[in-house]
Image (cartoon, rainbow, N blue to C red):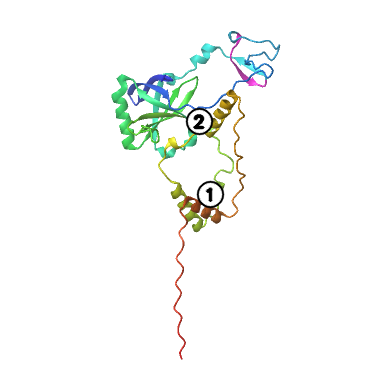
Amino acid sequence: MAGVWSGYLTFGLVTMPVRLYSGARGERISFHLLHATDHARLKQQMVCTQDGAVVPRSDTVRGYEFAKGEYVVIPEEQIKAAAPATERQLEIVEFCRADEIDPVWFEASYYLMPEAAGRRAYAVLMRAMRESEYIAVAQLSMHNREYLSLVRPSRLAGVPNGQQREGLLLHTLFYLDEVRVADGFGAAGGEEAHEAELKMARQLIEGLARPFDAARFEDHYRKNLEAVVAAALEGRPAPARPAAPRLAPVTDLMASLKQSLEKLGAAPEKKAPAKRAPRRRRAA
């Protein structure tokens, strides 16, 4: 696996050589644009919007649009010179608790691994963070951008054969002006919830609870597209897919919760019928 960044992790006055490796990569079926008449591959070209000429990459420069349609050209060497010290340095600037950062901040994940000369310092930092239950906030420059990052010890929970491993993961984070909070988010928190509904909802959650295992899940969209491509290669019709069920908002929440529990085979607890008081015999 090729590294995506190498440099030094700094922790106070402690410096250790490290390397970053991509932690995940999305897999999907991709298609190419073809000419509809002869199925030849189409290619993209850079075309000048002023004279319509095709421009080779060697004749391009970088420009910043400071007003509509007006640009100032910035030489490539000045762009490179603007790189901060974090271009080769992953600097831990502070520590915080994990529950202080919501996953909405996370952008991408990387394995942070030490070079041979940094293994001891790496192990000390990792174990100290695990025992203190703190995670690190850091900054580094990579791919022409300075990233706000989070470093945390991990045993790769949920990853096959990951339980026997422990190391540091780095998550690049969005900056404050990049995180958008949807209008109205949290408005449902003030809605009334009856105890009977909460009880059934908790039972449904417990009935669906099980240890996470990624092997139980697959990308159905990709699988269906693979079947479509296979059929096209073999000259067969594309396999038919059942229509998606039509959904509608719940009108009777209690009934829907009860039916969900019954479908799980865990019907809600029924209250024992109240005992009737014995009838008194009439005096003769």
Residue drawn 64% across the image and 19% down it: 34
Q: How many marks?
A: 2
The residue lying toward the viewer, choosing from 258 and 126, is 258
Disc 1 residue type?
Gly
The residue lying toward the viewer, choosing from 95 and 150, is 150
Q: Residues within 10 Å of mark 2 (few under 14, many from 20)?
A: few
The residue lying toward the viewer, choosing from 235 and 210, is 235
Task: Identify the residue position indicated by label 2 in the image.
Answer: 175
Residue drawn 31% across the image and 32% down it: 127
User: Residue 157: x, y in percent?
Assistant: 38, 35
Task: Identify the residue position indicated by label 1 in the image.
Answer: 189
Q: Is residue 124 left or right of residue 23?
A: left
State the CA–CA distance, disc 2 to disc 1.
26 Å
Dot 2 or dot 1: first in sequence order is: 2
Q: Residues within 10 Å of mark 1 (few under 14, many from 20)?
A: few
The vertical placement of 265 against 131, above or below, is below
Which of pointers 2 and 1 indicates the residue nearer the eye?
Answer: 1
Magenta-colored stretch includes residue 263: no
The vertical placement of 269 against 36, above or below, is below
Write the start and end of the magenta stretch as one range.
59-68
Quarter of the figure with residue 16: top left
User: Residue 206: x, y in percent?
Assistant: 43, 49
